Image: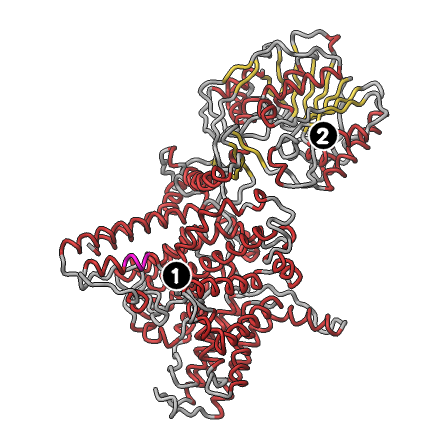
Amino acid sequence: MLRFRNALVFISIALVLCVPFTSTVLSKLGVVFPKWTGISEPVSYLDGGFKHGFPQVSAQTITSGEFQDNLELFLADHVPLRDNAVLAKSMTEHAIIGSMAFASSYDWYPTYFGSDTFYSDQYDALAPLPADFDPQINAGLSAFAENLTAYAQAHQDVNFYIYMVDQFAYSEANPLRDLEDDLPSTREFITLLQDGTAGLTNVHVTGIAYTDVGEYLQNYWRSDHHWNNKGALAAYNALALLASKPLIEDVEFTNLEGIIFNGSTARYGRYPVDEIPFDSTFDVSNLEMDIYGELPPSEQAMAAEKSPDEEKSTITTPQEIREAYLNSDHDRFDAFYENYYGDVIDTLITNKAAGTEQGEALLVGDSYASAIQYYIAGQYETTYVTYELYWESTDTPGEEPHTLDLHNARDVYFVANPADYASLLDRFPELFR
Amino acid sequence: MVFSSSVFLLLFMPVCIALYYLMPGRAAKNIFLFLASLVFYAWGEPVYVVLMIVSVFANYMFATLLGREADHTSDRAVHKPTKKARLYLILDLVFNLGVLGFFKYEGFLAQNLNALLGTELIPDLALPLPVGISFYTLQAVSYVIDVYRGEVEAQRNPLFLGMYIACFPQLVAGPIVRYSTIQEQIVNRKETMAGFCDGLRLFSVGLAKKVLLANVVAILATELLSMQGSELGLIGVWGGLLAYTFQIYFDFAGYSDMAIGLGRMFGFTYLRNFNYPYISRSATEFWRRWHISLGSFFRDYVYIPLGGNRVSTPRWLLNIAIVWLLTGIWHGAAWTFVLWGAYYGLLLIAEKTLLLKLLKRLPAFVQHIYALLTIMVGWLIFASIDIGQLGTLFAALVGAYGLTGTSSFAALGVWQYLPVFALCACASMPVIPWIRFKLVAWAEHREVKGGDFIEHDLPAPKMLSTERLCIFDMSKVSDVKRRRVLEVVALLADICLIVLFMCATISVISGSFNPFIYFRF
């Protein structure tokens, strides 16, 4: 019996220790493992990105410790069933904390020990811890207001509409604000921009600052930091009021059956809430998109097939982008928001049903803009969408600094979250030149 | 490299073990282990590995010179070191303690001296501390002193000595293995499948302690004990302190278990380093159960050479004070560690002179509460960032800032960890050995008296052997049916261990919070 037990212990532990390395080597040698093992998958949906590659070996990377750190990440990433195992761990911790939250009557509690993401049984939703006061955000917003003021004064014939997205980390609807004092809020940021651009008739600052968590979760995904179609539409209507454009009220929302969605908050919090996404019935059939930048991954193959000779420009439609996503394979943690709405960089949207009198618009945004762009584009003949506000976008060293190209737009929309506004001029110092 | 990392678990450990067993003969195995240990060390310290090699060869040289001078006899009374031997010993101590002092205390000395004199007398070089230097230096010192004393023979093969000093299982955080413990094993150890599997079991237990318990409570301890007492209040500071109390135990004891387990896999048998310290009834008992290898080092190489307790009372008290100040400063170059050492020095003097007699008259549970409180206060000093923060934490500890300070009960987060605390409390006590002892006694039709367990099984402080850890000793069980029951229980225990190992590995690959307190010592 002792021999049997020893053999059991030895074989079991040896398997746990040796399988990850062996399977990785075999995978690199071309052996294809079943998809469910995750071994041959180049991406980790749970981490929302590509797995770490084998680190570069050199004297410099070894002495600096970079090789060692990256090998640690490489090995951890390539363990079979790694995402499932990590999820199981956090779910176990979540259950332990949940039992104590139940006993303490706390509705919102961390998704795992040390997590900055909290879950609510009542709302079946996730919330991040509120962001602490950061003087850089206020300074960045003041700089934005100052530069925009000068730019707007120089372009009196152009109207500027600034929408401040109510991100959960800054929202007064965040139920976790009770845990801390002196937190910044979206409302304060809106006021800061309004005060910074006061007196200008062609600059209009707005934003819906929610105060009720239930209402907030009607307009933002329960597992993601982005707004959903209802939230984007509410934002459009707020802008439309200022821009004297027609309100969009006669749309319905339908579930995208067969798709389960867990956004960035779920990935970061290691806790799936399995949302069924929905879309509005707003008619986008007249919109055509000329994309100069990067296509969402689900549509890249289709675009290559469609215009093989063109390296950059790709003609597509919102419907094609959506269908490409709906017809592709899905993981519960894949990037629904980015792929479904199309996280493109530079796009010219043409409204075939509009006349020239409807003019041109420019939409400068971050990722929030992708869900609102079709509502705006539906009101103009042409709409340029640029993503300078997206946090990853920045001037390229050695190249001409980026400046705002108004084209012929008379209406310019800015749609972004507070942090992206605040960092804009750090990333594009010459934008308002 | 630390044991609780993907690189160690999924690459270094399996490859190292496989290659070790492929090596032909004892010498090749020893040399391989030395080289593997250098790779292990160089992984995190590519530059300081040179220091390690220099240390090995310097100690080899001094020990060889000492060996030539010594006349080896087991009778220490007969052994008379020569003047030359004394000189070699002093030179070796100057080298070892000089290196340790330079890397560990230069900055501390410079900061305090410069502040005292108001001038930049000594530059603060801000040197990064070579990992494990405090442990391998003491190990090397113990070896050379033992050679000087004639208790062991000098190792003739520098690579074998290198393997002893740098052996990766105990390199980073001990236990401080005496040369006399493994002298024979260096050339005569025997690796067996049973020993290997016992090592795996012990390693799994240690990994689970470190990753599944220490790392979890460390999240709370790190967060709360980085705050000021006014932010924490009574609940916050006690919650943080309890978390730290468990963290430091499972962190360090887990690492020791892993080290001892790894040693077993390579055929070595090390001594225990922890023996359920939190079941102690006094601070004196605690230090017989906590970091045993360090306590015995200071006892044998500092306290007893100073005269121990066979001197006048004032001198005896001075000896205790010296040992504890050294123990404190060994743990780190900061005033909080000096204060921590002084705290234990005073506490142990008080216990030895008066308190222990009083304590023995009290009920056992009162003694346990006394011991736990004194230990936890000690950890508060140990964990504090500086003396200023320590003051506010102490104030919070006695309720000066109310129940939750400026925070809310929900925000402190202590409530989340209550089930983990309960688990840690169980794991801090010899519950499993007790169950095992009872089962074996039942199977042997042996009547168990109240004191038997403490006297004969694991928690007995004198039993430092690690051979019986994780083993069901069924050798005296003659009842076939009951033996079967024991075998099934043992099988279930092994399955639990495998599951624990898998859970710990998952935790490691998930990139969870993975601090290691003793890494900086």
Q: Residue at x 55, y 53 (%)?
A: B240
Queried whether the magenta region covers residue B435, the answer comes back as yes
- Residue to which mark 1 is pinned: B257
Instruction: Tell me which segment is drawn in magenta.
Output: B432-436
Q: Is residue B363 left or right of residue A282?
A: left
Q: How many residues crowd around disc 1 within 10 Å: few (fewer than 14), some, or many (20 or more)? A: many
Amino acid at dot 2: Arg
The answer to whether residue A189 is above or below residue A376 is below
Q: Is residue A150 left or right of residue A252?
A: right
Q: Which mark is residue A187?
A: 2
Element type at marker 2? helix
Q: Is residue B420 at least partly visible in the picture?
A: yes
Q: Chain of mark 1?
A: B
Q: Residue at x 42, y 71 (%)?
A: B361
- Counting from the top left corner in percent of width and height, residue B67 is at 41, 85
The answer to whether residue B24 is above or below residue B98 is above
Q: Chain of mark 2?
A: A
Between residue B293 and residue B239, name the one nearer to us. Answer: B239
Report, in whole angstroms, how far the alpha carbon at label 2 lies from the one at label 1.
55 Å
- Counting from the top left corner in percent of width and height, residue B239 is at 53, 52
Q: How many residues crowd around disc 2 within 10 Å: few (fewer than 14), some, or many (20 or more)? A: some
